Image (tube, rainbow, N blue to C red):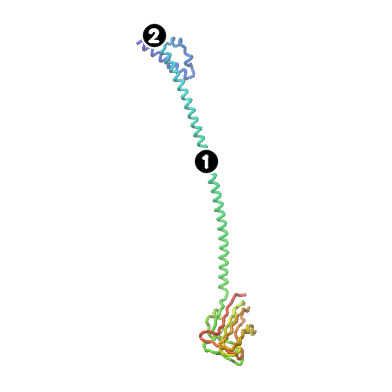
Amino acid sequence: MRRAAAFLALLLCLYWTGAQGESGGLTGNDITQTEIQSEILGVKSTSDQTNITPDIWAELKELRDMAIEHSVELRNSKSKIEKLEQEKLKIESADMMARLKISEHVMEELKMENTDLLDRVTSFEDKNKVLEARMTVSENEVEELKRQNADQPKVAFSLGLTDSGTIGPFNTDITLKFSKVITNFGQVYSPTTGLFTAPVRGAYYFSFTTLDGRNNVRREVHLYHNDKRVLNSHNYSAHSSESVSNSLVLQLEKGDVVYLVLPAGQSVYDSAEDFTSFNGFLLFPL
């Protein structure tokens, strides 16, 4: 029992020594064998222990050294752990910085792409506005042309003379009256009078063909503008069934008349096949 009490006192002494070392107090090197002996002797006098062998002192010293060594190793381990944690934090911080730089670079590229896209969209919108403006102009021009075309009179005629065969010759000049109306847009030609009357001031195109079935005769026909002869067409042939054809463009005022005249002594021939015809139309108003 006395040995157990002495050993317990020794353990309490070692625990106190370790606590002083950790708290910055006495270290293992500061505790001398004499101090330990004094403490043990105090325990001895208290517990009436009368005998402690030298082996116990050696064991106590070995235990104290082990406790100090463990305390130092614990502090070193803590220091190593702190260093490792700091290194880990540095690595993680460097990795985060690198990732942040990559993200910033990607963000700059996206900003540049977005700017380029906005520029392209703006350019497209500008081109689209130009196209819309041109389309509006074109539509307006088309509408104006439609209006002009609607306002422009429809003037055109194509006529055949007769189905009765030969007309003439006569002792005087006569106006040929084309009785077979093929087309007469605007009702500009009168089969009764044989006159084409211009409905508007403009440029007009006229053409005619006449056929004469006689032999060895002079074939002739005249085109008149009002009372003025503007075209004299003729030929001479020993053969029968010769035709005379001609055409011209006239500038007419509104109300002017155009007609074909068969001179005295001349004749023309026509049938259902329209060998003799008279045609005209408005080229454009003036």
- Under mark 1, the amino acid is Ile
Q: Image quadrant of residue 148? A: bottom right
Q: What residue does disc 2 label? A: 53
Image disc number at residue 256:
none
Residue, far front? 238
Q: Identify which residue, 158 or 165, lies in the foreground.
A: 165
For the residues marked 1 and 2, what is the alpha-carbon distance in whole angstroms?
74 Å
Specify the quadrant that holds the N terminus.
top left
- Secondary element under disc 2, as helix, strand or loop, is loop
Q: What residue does disc 1 label? A: 102
Q: Identify which residue, 48 or 128, lies in the foreground.
A: 128
The residue under the point 54% across, 42% down is 105
Residue, far bottom? 171
Residue, far left? 1
- Mark 2 or mark 1, which is nearer the start of the sequence? 2
Q: Identify which residue, 154 or 182, lies in the foreground.
A: 182
Residue, far right? 228
- Under mark 2, the amino acid is Thr
| Number of disc labels | 2
- Residue 283, horizontal then vertical, whole percent: 59, 76
- Secondary element under disc 1, as helix, strand or loop, is helix
Q: Is residue 12 left or right of residue 285?
A: left
Specify the quadrant that holds the C terminus.
bottom right
- Residue 278, horizontal then vertical, whole percent: 57, 83
The residue under the point 55% across, 47% down is 112
